[in-house]
Amino acid sequence: MTENLRIGIVGAGLMGGDHVTRITNRVSGASVSAIVEPDETRGAAAAANAPGARSFTRIEDAIEADALDAVLIATPGAYHEPVLLPALEAGLPILCEKPLTPDPESSLRILEAEQKLDRPHIQVGFMRRFDAEYAKLRALVESGRLGELLMVRAVHRNPDVPPSYTQSMLITDSVVHEFDVTPWLAGSDVRSVEVRHPRRNSKAPERLREPILVLIELANGVLVDVEMNVSIGFGYQVATEAVFEQGVARIGQPQGLQTWHDGTFAIDEHRSFTTRFADAYDAQIQRWVEAVKRGTIDGPSAWDGFKVALACEAGVAALDGGIQQVVIPERPAFYA
Amino acid sequence: MTENLRIGIVGAGLMGGDHVTRITNRVSGASVSAIVEPDETRGAAAAANAPGARSFTRIEDAIEADALDAVLIATPGAYHEPVLLPALEAGLPILCEKPLTPDPESSLRILEAEQKLDRPHIQVGFMRRFDAEYAKLRALVESGRLGELLMVRAVHRNPDVPPSYTQSMLITDSVVHEFDVTPWLAGSDVRSVEVRHPRRNSKAPERLREPILVLIELANGVLVDVEMNVSIGFGYQVATEAVFEQGVARIGQPQGLQTWHDGTFAIDEHRSFTTRFADAYDAQIQRWVEAVKRGTIDGPSAWDGFKVALACEAGVAALDGGIQQVVIPERPAFYA
Amino acid sequence: MTENLRIGIVGAGLMGGDHVTRITNRVSGASVSAIVEPDETRGAAAAANAPGARSFTRIEDAIEADALDAVLIATPGAYHEPVLLPALEAGLPILCEKPLTPDPESSLRILEAEQKLDRPHIQVGFMRRFDAEYAKLRALVESGRLGELLMVRAVHRNPDVPPSYTQSMLITDSVVHEFDVTPWLAGSDVRSVEVRHPRRNSKAPERLREPILVLIELANGVLVDVEMNVSIGFGYQVATEAVFEQGVARIGQPQGLQTWHDGTFAIDEHRSFTTRFADAYDAQIQRWVEAVKRGTIDGPSAWDGFKVALACEAGVAALDGGIQQVVIPERPAFYA
Amino acid sequence: MTENLRIGIVGAGLMGGDHVTRITNRVSGASVSAIVEPDETRGAAAAANAPGARSFTRIEDAIEADALDAVLIATPGAYHEPVLLPALEAGLPILCEKPLTPDPESSLRILEAEQKLDRPHIQVGFMRRFDAEYAKLRALVESGRLGELLMVRAVHRNPDVPPSYTQSMLITDSVVHEFDVTPWLAGSDVRSVEVRHPRRNSKAPERLREPILVLIELANGVLVDVEMNVSIGFGYQVATEAVFEQGVARIGQPQGLQTWHDGTFAIDEHRSFTTRFADAYDAQIQRWVEAVKRGTIDGPSAWDGFKVALACEAGVAALDGGIQQVVIPERPAFYA
């Protein structure tokens, strides 16, 4: 491994472009050496922000040209598998944006391919684990200082969503984060999912029936309720309240510059995930770069991604009613 | 009606004694003229704090002695009916601590008796309606400024409960407040109740399986989830977050003196409802006194109390599972 | 003393009218029995809100008619002396709105008149002492929990002031409250006053050079700095930060209903002192009524009012520069 | 300029070691190539954390060996001049920890040496300018949204100080930050300094008379008062409240994980500047690295450092009383 980690970014959309800037300007010990993007115009635009990066339209070409040491996949989930498989075959370390793949079956195929290697090569991009406040909350759970964790009450509010956003994406694109981060906080897997429908937001696109309230039960009995809102207008907010036996903790509260003006005390709320989780994205990449240099990963594995896919499948079914069970197979020793 | 309203307090326990002090020292235009309490020692102790008050062991005797203009019932719910009926028969204005009675059947009997009078005489002591923050939240709902109300996320946390507190009292003694105040906030009746069980608090008394999460659906589609906790140790907290179409509002947040000391920024939390709702209790009584002088009530009626009894019945059933429906009969014109 | 304290209100302006409503509707054990107001139209309007109250144009007439048991003076400070003297001569208990009188000389005349009685009859209306947060802060000082009090950093911000408000009223009408409450908090008298001039607010009326920063040194070394602002527009705010040896405490912070809307987390600020100190005014009157019935006062005495007059005199001089000393004569045993 | 900026760190104490870790692990486009430290053991320890870095005992040797592209000076202020002069002579870009030098005379010598070069080479390490909240506050000032800035009320509280900390260091080591950041916020130079002494903290070391309250007047009339506290025990806090004509803004308020436990709502306060300003230090170095590559600086210049030295001189004199004037010579075009 060279001292400078050469990263190939696959997908030069909003998220990919963001990663190009991040790695080029804020991450130590790595650079963007390749942009893989079928749309050549878009690829060239992204490459222009990464001095020295080469452009490719297919991951296979980038691999063959030895243009990268590691892969960061930032395409939509439906396009992950055809990048993951050749990258695994080439034995490359991979950071794959969430979700690993769109469904449990394809995730299983990834797991199989990965297990042909000597050790896990894939890290999935659930960046909340790298947010400083989530990390403190997890440390509080582990400390036992407030007793055992009993409930988690979560909020995920978006000002709006793009036209491509569908009803099932409430689960697979948004609640998906809770399916990863809550088990990570609570140290226990998802056991069941229920969805309850509050009054519909008349400001939501016609195709969406939202907000929804998602009830997630974990194997250790912890109950999570997630308010999932994607047309609330005012801003972007992700907040969590953890209820312990002898206390309560919460994160994601208003902070920063405070003003008094025109009859009101005010604090600006975030407008999108890009500012809310800016530091978490930076930390995720920095720590992944360092882990790759040590020959490991430092975050959720493909196995974690697979479990999330199972929970999403149950969550989508739960949109139509009932408490849906999630059955997780035994974990392969490979992912121990 | 004399200028000074002579109030008879029935029940000289903690709550009754509190009302004696309140009316004697902080309420304008009223005084405690009678204490009705079967335990004579206790009754005499309470009367000592109310200059000029006479003591009785039975409400009938107080009525016969013309010792009061209005009745405030502060006994446990099981003892309300035998006081309500003679007081109604005597045509007295009544403020009855919650619940009206312990079940819908007995509440119906009260409704029948009351309807023999010319107008409603009973106000039920759901004091949250008199809390300044709840009032502001309701005004915000009515203003439509943030759009329609969609969800309510409520928290009710007690440090501990007395030995007499049973599993069903999670509903009938505690969640009962949400059954009154949420329909009042949202302008719609309770339609169904579901109870979900998080991990059990090992600090709870053995007989209790708590906390619980109660999901209340209102007729207009608003979904309420109530975290009900009675062994959380740290303090007494009642907080509500209202989710609108275009914004969010919350009440019950930490306030008052702030300190920095020993590494921490801190604000004291309440230890019991007596401080959390002190002003609400005062306002409830003051406004009831004024309403009585005008020949009316100013707060939840016996009909409201009956609807809460129906919701409690469903809630207790829901402790054993399922989504329990609440069917509310048509409202008599008497309570229009 | 009758059970019901009959209070005569002198001055039926904004403040007097406010006290009429307060005593009639929210104070226990007292009623407004007389309105004394030279403007008969105004006096009649105020009397209309106080059932049974009689109207007078001179305090002497009200006293002669035995129309009151106690006097509440709510006229501007310049008119206090001609009411205080006959009321003292009649031996009546008095609650006198701040200031006691406009200058130390006239205050001394009041002290002399009062000392002819058997005990202090005058309480001065510095209502901050009755604010719940100030009370908690004082209890914290007395507890020694955070060590000795070293500094107080105070803020007094008004949205605007009426045309009658002059430069010296920055001291005599506004900072006057700090001259009373800070010594009360710190347990030590004012020793000197300095005024520093920040950049002038261009929104201030032309006649005013403000905001100002007032530095008050107490005899025990505690240093107080008061930001005094009267054209800040956004609302009414009184806040205090107390710096101790081993910690810090503050009061007057934003509280109440919180909302997220349109990109912002917000809490309403007060618009005037009437809401900020509503509870303090109520508590002041209620406790004074009870004290009067016990034959005493329960709040700042005329001696406290005199000391404040001395501090104001120094403060007004300090508007022109320099550190102005305040010399307080020995306290008469009468005020021990 | 090579793509990777080779930085030589001068001084391997606490601050220097911190910078080694920062540049090695979190800064993009730079590495630590040399450690200059007279204490060889200490130098070797620091070098061990910087792969590939060489150790030197004198800056001249590092320059002669062509071991660096830029210099970061992290020694105590008294040792800055003998490093600055040879580094300037070698034409190297320099980031010099505050203060530039301990007094105006030596700062002037540095200015003279620097002006022999083609452009400013020195940036002074006043890292508050790189704190996200200070940046937002400055943007608010510049926006004019709340009107003109009138006052700044600042707080700088340390839990304790090392034995080497002297009375004058209250000014030269601590208030020094306000002498840089407040003019930067307000867009105006320091005109005078006054120091007022509150009650002394009995927990302070015997040699210190503190806290102090420092009043700084700027040329545009803005008045700043700084509470400077170095034995307050509870934690490390830097907060600022800016008073505008039509509103108020503040930064440095409690944030992060919130807990309820044992009767209290709490947020952890910082314990030292290393966490309070961790992000600001990172941003300062990252932006300086990028500026150096563009052949410029991106932060306070040596001229800014000189003006701060003048203010410190006045501040130290003010410890003994009076309002001390600060006379700033005309700015050389070189620093325009």
Image (cartoon, coloured by chain):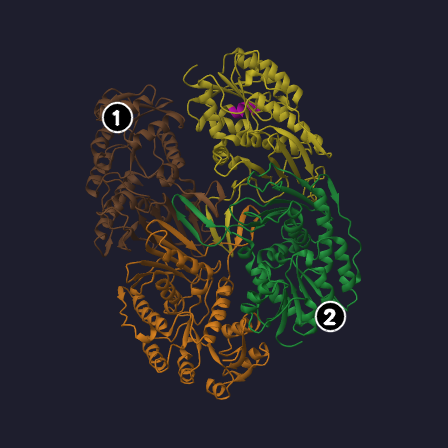
Chain colours: A yellow, B green, C orange, D brown
Residue B233 locus on image (x, y percent) = 52, 45
**Of residues A216 and C232, the one drawn nearer to the viewer in this rendering:** A216
Give the answer, above or below, for where A327 lies relative to C42: above
Residue C292 locus on image (x, y percent) = 46, 75
Quadrant of the image containing the C terminus of chain B: bottom right
State the extent of the magenta-drawn residues as a range: A41-46
Report helix, strand or loop for mark 2: loop
**Of residues B88 and D80, the one drawn nearer to the viewer in this rendering:** B88
Query: Residue C85, located in which quarter of the rendered image?
Result: bottom left
Residue under label 1 = D42
Distance from label 1 to label 2 (Cα)? Answer: 93 Å
Viewer-side label of 1, 2: 2
* C293 relative to B47 in the view: left or right: left
Q: Main secondary structure of the magenta part?
A: helix
* A149 relative to C156 in the view: left or right: right
Report helix, strand or loop for mark 1: helix
Quadrant of the image containing the N terminus of chain B: bottom right
Query: Residue A59, located in which quarter of the rendered image?
Result: top right
Q: Amino acid at mark 1?
A: Arg
Residue under label 2 = B90
